[in-house]
Amino acid sequence: MSNQRRTLSFTESVNHMADRAFEVLTIDPGIATAIKACTATLEVNFPVEINGKIEVFTGWRSVHSSHRLPSKGGIRYATIVDKDEVEALAALMTYKCAIVDVPFGGSKGGLLIDPGRYNRDDMQKITRRFARELIRKGFLSPATNVPAPDMGTGEREMAWIADTYKHLHPEDVNYTGCVTGKPVAHGGIRGRAEATGRGVVYVMREFFRHLDCVVKAGFTGALSGKRVVIQGLGNVGYHAAKLLQEEDGCLITSIIEKDGALFKEAGLDIQAINDYIVEHKTIIGYPDAHFVADGKKLLEMDCDILIPAAMEGQITPDNAGRIKAALIVEAANGPITFEADEILRRRGITILPDAYVNAGGVTVSYFEWVRNLAHIRFGRMERRYDEMRGGHMLSAIQSMTEQPIPEWIQKELVQGADELDLVRSGLDDTMRLSFQQIKAVFDSNDKVSDYRTASYVVAIDKISRSYLDIGVY
Ligand code: GLU
């Protein structure tokens, strides 16, 4: 047998991370095996006619768990996607949903495709055909399996999927709930597109509210002024970066993209970079920053906080020894391999893990699904009533005190919450409460010395309870 070291697959990496928590929890090995096992993975090959020629596409939908239904998780379109990746991501969805108390099982889908090669009409044909495959084979419905956007997909694809389901199942009154991340005009919810990135920022704000955590991570002071490096200015990275720069006073010193990285000691202008990317489809040539061709190298740059928001397997044993950030906030799924995680842990680098950090997306997907089943927009019944009560309260205070009330307080008192206010409030509450549960495990259990294990303990404790309470039959 060769003694060359074999790199772990993505699924093995996730399972090894979960194993640390299983050891801490001393769970029945049978239940542990049942929790870790992937329930089912569908692989489909389907033909689509593109410009008069038949092309065959391969896609997967994996259900990792169905202890709660529907099983939930995105569908990614990428040139590198396979069964192992989809199964690992589905497992992460199981843990993610449990951590943030979203009552769903875990699932994930992938389609092997380069979306840049096809026009809108072709993408629509391909997406509708893929959706039909999933629906007919029982891997897509509001009750059992609900996809969402992921890498390479967005509102547009979700709208096509929802419409395909509606045509196949017009009798299903809840058809809009068959997929989340839809456009607002087609049953989507306000605040879903920004949710994962915003959730990342809510996590960071909560972390910096706990002085003991901040000090343990080697920091002094607040989030404001921290130097942040972000890998990936996609949907997640963009919203996180923009909020951190504009609302939290962070200096985004580097943005790492596929075609290189931008660097500016005094802090980058995120909106300007995003506008540049939208116009030029690249960061190359952006005028107000230094450009570094070997972008990935900047993961190792001196900074306070590193946010990998691109894809899995970015921090490996090859670069883990050179990472300088004191805190890594995993906005992507699986950006740190198991082996790299061991190195970073030994080096005392604090990691806030993916299954918790990027759970804002599925949290707001849950709100969207509930809204679809309720067939009513959040806030529709109570907003004007709340405004009226606020108005009465204001008049009462004014007539009792005979004091002028500052205009901004008047506005706050009178305003009823709309859907976006409620979604953001629910997201913030979810991310805060989950951190407090993770921290409670971290603080109280001698065998837990990192936030990833603490997060998995929180998740597995809840999942195993559902197996124990209901039984295996
Ligand atoms: N694709 C996202 C994730 O990895 C969202 C999943 C969802 O909303 O169902 O968490």
Image (cartoon, helix red, strand yellow):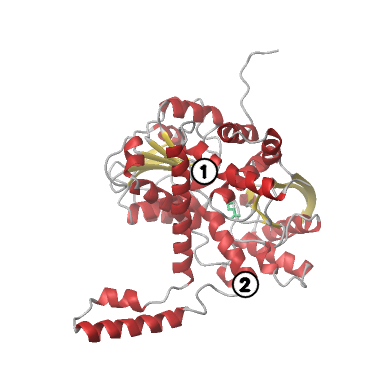
**Could you tell me how many numbered marks the image carries?**
2
Left or right: residue 222 compared with residue 234 = left
Q: Quadrant of residue 22?
A: top right
Which amino acid type is marked by label 2?
Ala
Which amino acid type is marked by label 1?
Asp
**Label 1: few (<14), some or many (≥20) within 10 Å?**
many
Going 51% across and 67% down the picture, which residue do you hit?
190
Q: Is residue 34 above or below residue 359?
A: above
- Tell me the quadrant of the picture where the N terminus can be found: top right
Q: Earlier in the sequence, mark 2 or mark 1?
A: 1
The percent position of residue 419, horizontal first and vertical second, equals 49, 71
Q: Is mark 1 within 8 Å of ligand 1?
A: no
Residue 151 visible in the picture: no
Identify which residue, 310 or 413, lies in the foreground: 413
Going 23% across and 76% down the picture, which residue do you hit?
406
Q: Which mark is residue 414?
A: none
Q: Secondary structure at mark 2?
A: helix
Identify which residue, 146 or 183, lies in the foreground: 146
* Marks 2/1: CA–CA distance: 30 Å
Question: Which-is-in-front pick, marks 2 and 1?
Answer: 2
Q: Which residue is mark 1?
A: 354
Q: Secondary structure at mark 1?
A: helix
Identify which residue, 14 or 391, lies in the foreground: 391
The percent position of residue 125, horizontal first and vertical second, equals 72, 60
Q: Is residue 126 above or below residue 95?
A: below
Left or right: residue 167 compared with residue 393 = right
Q: Is mark 2 within 8 Å of ligand 1?
A: no
Q: Which residue is mark 2?
A: 374
